Amino acid sequence: MAVTFDKVFGVHQYTLGVRNKRAEVLAGNLANAETPGYKARDLDFGLALSQAADRVMVKKDTLPEEEMTLTNERHMDASSLPDDPELTLKYRLPYQADTGNGNTVETNSERMKYTQNTLEYQASLQFLNSRITKLMSALKSNS
């Protein structure tokens, strides 16, 4: 029976990279809290996670994806879109619009999101550490 990373680690192997990228984006927002005209951004976590999983999980025996049928000449061809991680970055709408310099960073909200992201990153690390410990224990007991 073959053991794959997907079976052992599940989605947590992909979340670390996405959480790291989100931490960079949120830190950038906090660093630019006083920059006039700066627009706060955030990562679309679900989209970024699915992109990361799709990029890494290339399986040989999966069926090819079906292509979308264009029913109107004004429809976009989805296959021509680039697989760009920047597409997962979205501008955040502020809770309170700033009437001064046009900056949309809300420091308290950014700190809260950064802290939450850090806790979720730590949870994924602990889960992976637990799985690796179990694997090592299983390997030691078999030898």
Image (cartoon, grey):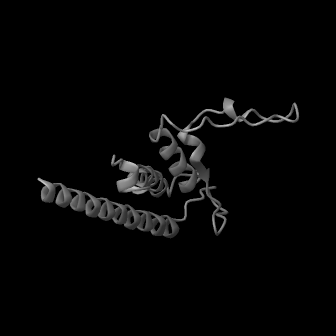
User: Taking 140 as reference, is 82 left or right?
Assistant: right
State the residue lying farthest toward the right: 72
Residue depicted at 54% across the width and 39% down the height: 62
User: Taking 125 as reference, is 6 left or right?
Assistant: right
User: Taking 114 as reference, is 35 left or right?
Assistant: right
Q: Residue 5: horizontal and vertical position, in percent? A: 36, 48
User: Taking 104 as reference, is 54 left or right?
Assistant: left
Residue depicted at 52% across the width and 68% down the height: 109
Q: Residue 68: horizontal and vertical position, in percent? A: 75, 37
Q: Is residue 37 visible?
A: no
Residue depicted at 50% across the width and 58% down the height: 33
Q: Nearer the viewer, residue 54 or 114?
A: 54
Residue depicted at 87% across the width and 36% down the height: 71
- Against 122, residue 64 (above or below) is above
The count of marks equals 0
Q: Residue 30: horizontal and vertical position, in percent? A: 46, 58
- Against 67, residue 97 (above or below) is below
- Against 81, residue 119 (above or below) is below
**Quadrant of residue 134 in the image?**
bottom left
**Quadrant of residue 114 in the image?**
bottom left
- Against 19, residue 70 (above or below) is above
State the residue lying farthest toward the left: 143
Q: Residue 7: horizontal and vertical position, in percent? A: 39, 53
Q: Is residue 76 visible?
A: yes
